[in-house]
Amino acid sequence: MAYIQVTKDNIEKEHICCAISNNKDIQVSSKKERMMKCFDDGLIF
């Protein structure tokens, strides 16, 4: 199994584990938007 580091550069094409829906789902898009802001604060996902 390989690990993928999700970053600002690849977050739109990567699946985030707890979001089973597609990127158009409000839960997925809002979580990814929040994560984008947190990457600047040092978030590693």
Image (cartoon, rainbow, N blue to C red):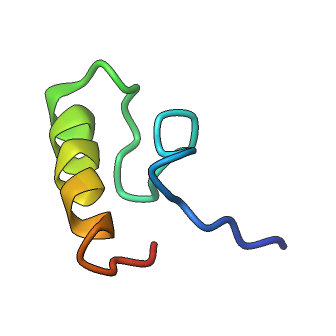
**Extreme residue in the front direction:** 40
Relative to 35, is 45 above or below?
A: below
Relative to 39, is 44 above or below?
A: below
Decide which of 10, 20 is in the foreground and name it: 10
- Look at 40% across and 41% down and name the residue there: 20
**Extreme residue in the right direction:** 1
Image x and y of residue 39, in percent = 32, 66
Left/right of residue 10 with respect to residue 18 in the rendered view: right
Relative to 3, is 31 above or below?
A: above
**Extreme residue in the top direction:** 24
Left/right of residue 18 with respect to residue 28 in the rendered view: right
Q: Quadrant of residue 29?
A: top left
Left/right of residue 1 with respect to residue 6 in the rendered view: right
- Look at 68% across and 65% down and name the residue there: 4
Image x and y of residue 6, in percent = 53, 60
Image x and y of residue 16, in percent = 45, 53
Q: Where's the C terminus, which quadrant?
A: bottom left
Q: Where's the N terminus, which quadrant?
A: bottom right
- Look at 30% across and 18% down and name the residue there: 24
Q: What is the tally of numbered marks visible in this picture?
A: 0
Decide which of 25, 42 is in the foreground and name it: 42
Relative to 25, is 31 above or below?
A: below
Left/right of residue 39 with respect to residue 31 in the rendered view: right
Image x and y of residue 37, in percent = 20, 57
